[in-house]
Image (cartoon, grey):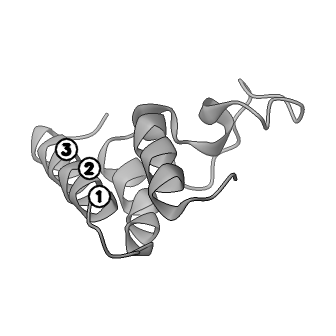
Amino acid sequence: MACVVCRKIGRALLGVMIETVDRPVIDYWWIFAVPLYHLLTDTVKPFSRSSKHSSTSHRKPDWWGIADFDLLVERFKKNQGADM
């Protein structure tokens, strides 16, 4: 379980990621913060296998670890004019 301070830092990091996506300048650097967000919010455990996701569920946001901010990803795609 993540400590309270870690979760607060994770939420602040998510805020920075959202601000970065909403900028008019194309900036994809927020993507590099995703692993740190996962560790701070206790979303993933390093070096552990996930048994709850099958290999066929790769089209779902949970499989990619973006369920917490899938709207952020959609906004990023829209701002980039991309159909990813």
- View extreme (right): residue: 56
Q: Which residue bears the numbered disc 1?
A: 17
Answer yes or no: do the residues labelled 3 and 1 have beta carbons within 8 Å?
no
Between 59 and 7, the one lying in front of the other is 59
Residue at the (68%, 36%) spot, across then down: 63
Looking at the image, residue 41 sits to the left or right of residue 65; the answer is: left
Ranked by sequence position, the earlier of labels 3 and 1 is 3
Q: Which residue bears the numbered disc 2?
A: 14
Q: Amino acid at mark 1?
A: Met
Residue at the (70%, 30%) spot, across then down: 60
Q: Amino acid at mark 2?
A: Leu
- How far apart are the alpha carbons under marks 2 and 1? 5 Å
Task: For residue 43, say whether it is visible.
Answer: no
Task: For residue 9, say whether it is visible.
Answer: yes
Looking at the image, residue 20 sits to the left or right of residue 84; the answer is: left
Q: Secondary structure at mark 2?
A: helix
In the rendered image, residue 74, in percent from the top left (x then y), is placed at 50, 43
Which disc is residue 11 wearing?
3
- View extreme (top): residue: 52
Which image quadrant: the N terminus? top left
Looking at the image, residue 75 sits to the left or right of residue 9; the answer is: right
| Label 3 environment density (alpha carbons within 10 Å; few <14, some 14–19, many ≥20) | some
| Label 2 environment density (alpha carbons within 10 Å; few <14, some 14–19, many ≥20) | some
Answer yes or no: do the residues labelled 2 and 1 have beta carbons within 8 Å?
yes
Q: Is residue 12 above or below residue 25?
A: above
Residue at the (62%, 55%) spot, across then down: 47
Q: Amino acid at mark 3?
A: Arg
Residue at the (20%, 41%) spot, across then down: 7
Answer yes or no: do the residues labelled 3 and 2 have beta carbons within 8 Å?
yes
